[in-house]
Amino acid sequence: MLLPHATLAEPQHFSLAEKLIFLALIVASIAAFWRRFGAVLDKILKSKKDPGFRLFPIGRRVWDFFREVMCQARVIRQRPLPGLAHAFVFWAFCAFALVTLNHCATGFGGAFLDPAGLFGRFYSWLAAAFALACAIGIFGLFVRRFLVRPRWLGEDLSWESGLIALLIFVLMVTYLAAFFVTDTAPAARVLWWIHSLTLLAFLPVIPHTKHLHLVLSPFTIFLSRGGFSAIPSLAGDEDFGLVAGKDLTQIVSLQTYSCVECGRCSEHCPATNTGKLLNPKEIVLGLRGYLNEFGPASEESLIGKYVAQEAVFQCTTCGSCEFQCPVGIEHVPILVGLRRGAVNTGAWDDDHGGKLFLALERGSNALGLGAAERDKFIQRQELPIFDGSQEYCLWLGCMGGYDPQGREIIADFARVMSYLGTSFGVLRKEKCTGDPVRRLGNDLVFQQLAESNLETLQQNKVKKIVSICPHCVRTIQTDWKEFGTPPEIEHHSEFLARHLDKLGVSPVPRLEPGKEKIVYHDPCYLGRYRNIYDEPRRVAALAGDLVEAPRHRERSFCCGAGGGLAFLGEEKGERVSHARAAELAATGATTVAAACPFCNTMFRDALAATGDGAPQLLDIAQIAARGLPRGQPVKMNESL
Amino acid sequence: MKIIVAIKQVPERDAQVRIDPVGKWIEELDVQFALNESDAYALEEALQLKEKHGGEVIVISAGPERAGQVIREALAKGADRGIHIEADDLGSRDALGVARLLAAAIQPENPDLVLAGLQSEDLGLGQTGVILAELLGFPHSSLILHVDVTAKGLKVKRELEEGWFQSIELPLPAVLAIQSGGNKLRYATLMGIKRAKTKEVRRASAGELGADASPVVILEGISLPQKQRSTQILPGSPKEASAALVEKLRFEARVL
Ligand SMILES: Cc1cc2nc3c(=O)[nH]c(=O)nc-3n(C[C@H](O)[C@H](O)[C@H](O)COP(=O)(O)OP(=O)(O)OC[C@H]3O[C@@H](n4cnc5c(N)ncnc54)[C@H](O)[C@@H]3O)c2cc1C
Ligand code: SF4
Ligand code: SF4
């Protein structure tokens, strides 16, 4: 049986000719690397500087780097098995940095690690352990890509990936094999040369393939804007978003060149999954193609040859792509940036979109109804008017103020608040938060709405807001910051979960006692955008036993309404809401619990279309209200 | 083609209005103002004519300081320059008085075409455009949905009652009063607003224009409509009740 030696075998003497050949190969390899890499770097550096970029506070960046790069947290969390295989390849690369330096130094007679010395021996064995894990890992990844072939990796087999896997495998095997020979054996020299040649072949392959991410993605993650779907402020009088190459910032360019083409972003994309034109990966690669052809200073429109306008306006801004991307690409700001470019310059022409913009330029709500409709609803429901003395301002939002189903949610939530003895009031005047126009890229109308609302809130001395709509919550708390200081705001799920002990007092009436199964749908703007997953589930559980849909929590599948799409009319192909409703109904649940009035309208028809025995649809506020004690009507107007 | 569009700032459509203490106008402090709807269509028509045939679009508005807002909006949507007739006394001027102001400011510009909205959302008189044409000595036509430029002048499509349309030709220069709904309005853009900052707005005071302010129509007072709710329960079987309902809808409410 062949047993490894205690030490790694490295040839000790190299002839002058060998040294010269090695040197020439190194120079050639680096030159071939730089020819492409230099060009890429040049495009990134010549891109526009990110106006709002700040390196500090650096703690967050260091932490992101540690978690996402060093620990490969997202890579593993989102795909445990292949993720771990990838992580071992990565860790082996890190361990091999020193080994490779020493390997090259050996070729010039300057080895600094003594394989027989204490540290040298320890380190070479440590590297060997990683090499073994890496070889197994890369073999596994090879099998997955070429034999298992998951759907999201696309139809075409990538010869590049095969080549890279082979090179890495040879590197590891030649390293490990050196434990089985002695320094002086000719085999040691042969192994050394194979290892060297593989290494020198590997280097130029990196920038010519998607393995460019080896070099770029650590920077991409370290330099990312941070936050989730952080839409940058426009800077100066000539910034209208992503119109042409000259508007691509360094961070965007860096991101486009970092894409590994892994397809994770498309896997849960509601647009890609329902046969729309949009595929977030193609958007990133489209921008890369644009940069390759036109470069970062170009005046050529971004929307055109490489990026289709139709695709850009199919995004629901659900953020699933951004959440999944292992190299930290921020798709939503890119997509919203492209929309801004098209809308802020008037290039986007769409009947529904135009109507929405005009409705919000003049009116107060995205539904295009008269503000008097909201007043009538407030009077009918006898909702108290906020006068500064109450604890909460209950924000109605467009759906809560104008949509029949949204109004039912408000009415029930108000009943719950009154029952709990929490004082609240609604504003006499309220405008749309601007969520749909923000996500559709209309900065002019968004600014008008944000400023007008901020002024109203300030005049009314509002300190705390509660809202039934995750889109309102996000827009008020995060997006309005560009124009002022919004009051504290929370989503009603957070409020309800805090008061749960006082809510389950009488049993919630169930369809079938003891048999009610509830499936909770995570709204994108509550889950991925706000990180709230457990609170609404605890409220929903008042009405029965919770079951989970196959895609839930961070991986929840969008209802199709976000990004202003609720207002853009009929979609092409399969409806996103129908796809999701079918998934929810298939859990066998008797009730679908929602926590967003937009999800609610989307599912209203979609659930009915799933056929007989479709589950009923309730907001968590409606579930909570059903458990209030009967018999004692809760009056809204009484001062509490 | 040099086109002038008369635009008016009116209270926002769903504004809750209150009558002022004198009883002749509304409390302006309560309400937000916006561009009159048919004027938005007049502007859109002008911009589309310019896109097709070249030329210049000038917007003109008479009103207090706040009227500058609708001029800026129009510039943002693509008008080339603006004229603001600064006047705080529009309440006491009748349609003739306003038209005199507009005519005095428009005359020196020698326009090929003047567009007005059909009627304003606040007063609803529908006269300003027509009187303006008389004062300028131009031919006019109102209720216009579509404008084509021909070799001899204009060919326009007018809206009549009950889905009828009329097509007429008239020479230039002319005044047209534009009906809402003929075109798809463009939305305002950030780029438009930024570009508008550099466009010229000429201010002219009513005094400078020297237009006669004495009204021929005196406004006596305004009042809010009285709300009255009278619910009737129609008795009888469903069949009888629905027959009675149809009867009432047809002859009392006249909606059928
Ligand atoms: C065929 C027909 C049928 C009708 N049927 C009915 C009916 O059944 N019932 C009914 O109630 N009415 C009806 N009307 C409407 C009625 O005649 C209205 O009184 C009239 O049309 C109202 O216009 P106005 O005076 O508000 O417009 P004006 O106030 O004269 O405004 C017209 C335009 O002049 C310009 N203008 C006005 N002031 C300014 C300013 N300060 N600065 C710049 N520009 C300005 C604007 O462009 C404005 O749009 C009908 C009209 C027609 C033609
Ligand atoms: S945000 Fe959602 S809809 Fe938009 S591209 Fe990403 S996954 Fe697709
Ligand atoms: S953008 Fe990110 S998730 Fe999408 S293919 Fe590229 S690396 Fe993968």
Image (tube, coloured by chain):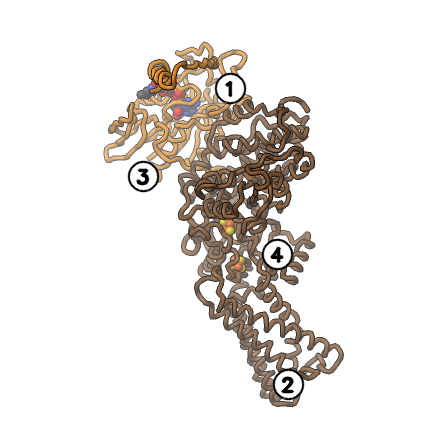
Chain colours: A brown, B orange
Q: Residue at x 55, y 44 (%)?
A: A521
Q: Chain of mark 3?
A: B
Q: Which residue is mark 4?
A: A223
For marks 3 and 4, give the CA distance.
Answer: 50 Å
Kindly report which numbered mark, 1 or 3, lies closer to the viewer in this rendering. 1
On the same chain, marks 2 and 1? The answer is no
Amino acid type of the residue that numbered disc 2 sits on in the rendered structure: Leu
Residue A46 seen in the current view: no
Q: Are marks 4 and 1 in contact (CB under 8 Å)?
A: no
Q: Are marks 3 and 4 in contact (CB under 8 Å)?
A: no
The N terminus of chain A, quarter of image = bottom right
Q: Which mark is drawn over residue B53? A: 3
CB of mark 1 near ligand 1 (< 8 Å): no
Kindly report which numbered mark, 3 or 2, lies closer to the viewer in this rendering. 2
Q: Which residue is mark 1?
A: B17
Looking at the picture, does residue A633 appear above or below residue A441?
A: above
Q: Which mark is drawn over residue A2? A: 2
Residue B48 seen in the current view: yes
